[in-house]
Image (spheres, rainbow, N blue to C red):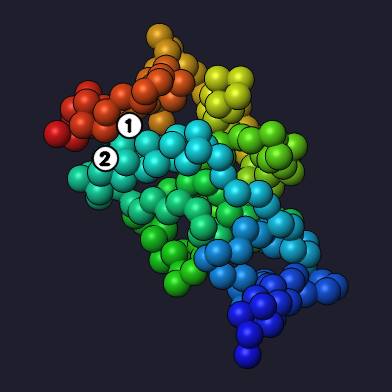
Amino acid sequence: MSSTTEQRIDHEQKLPPTGRISFEQFLEWCDEDTLAEWVDGEIVMTSPASDQHQDLSDFLVAVIRPFSETRQLGQLRSAPFLMRTEARPSGREPDLMFVAQERIDLVKTNYLDGAADLVVEIVSPESIGRDRGEKFVEYEAAGVREYWLIDPLRQQAEFYQLGADDHYRLGSVADGIYRSQVLPGFWLRVAWLWQRPMPTILSVLKELGVL
């Protein structure tokens, strides 16, 4: 078989199934190289991340993961990893999500079976409508306790916390610092996100008291 034929077959195999499908069918079709989400039984294709997007994601993973691990707070997952919720229902792929230790049984082999405690979405021109609209409503309804919206284009970060009335409220940023409710003791200097070059991971971990 020629390489051209193999490429054509591979492409055909990755075409989204037609019509509505179950979450289980979506998992069978989707793989780590496929940028897609499952919403109301339909496949929603997404775009590749930009360099700045990836830089921010890597930075947050590098500072949150050791902080969480040293305090045994829970587990952090970064894209591509699905979060399944029944509020819509949907299988979303947040940029980052954190699950508290007492809910760690929700972490399955290739998806999170329920709402994460913390979700981070890094906004891009392509995703701004979903992140601020559909996902905001879905995450709120699903019970995601904390939702960070980070917009590098506008250099704007919003930290939403789920209130007793099950609605999001903007969390306080005092003196340029946001203190998480989901990650006890963790704080983030918002200016770090826009600093170029970004601060070194070692320097941030020292400030956070991890090192």
Residue 183 drawn above or below residue 46: above
153 to 67, vertically: above or below:
above
Q: Is 179 situated left or right of 136 in this image?
A: left
Query: Label 1 to label 2, Cα distance in Å?
Result: 8 Å
Task: Identify the residue at the far left of this view.
Answer: 211
On the image, the x and y values in percent for residue 99 come to 42, 52
Identified at 39% across, 61% down, the residue is: 104
Residue 83's image quarter?
Answer: bottom right
Residue picked out by circle 2: 67
Question: What residue occupies the far top of the structure in this picture?
Answer: 175
Up-down relation of residue 85 to residue 205 (above or below): below
Return the residue found at the far right: 19
Q: Judge by depth and name the residue closer to the eye, 45 or 102.
A: 45
Residue 11 image point, x, y percent: 69, 73
- The quarter in which the N terminus is drawn is bottom right
Q: Residue at x 25, y 48 (%)?
A: 69
Residue 21 sits in quarter = bottom right
SS at mark 1?
A: loop
Please tell me which residue is depicted at 39% across the width and 51% down the height of the picture. 76
Whether label 1 touches label 2, CB < 8 Å: yes
Residue visible at 63% across and 85% down in the picture: 2
Query: Amino acid under label 2?
Result: Phe
What is the quadrant of the C terminus in the image? top left
Residue 4 is at least partly visible in this image: yes
Query: What amino acid is found at the position of numbered circle 1 in the picture?
Result: Phe
Q: Nearer the viewer, residue 37 or 35?
A: 35
Question: SS at mark 2?
Answer: helix
Quarter of image, res 178: top left
Residue beneath disc 1: 186
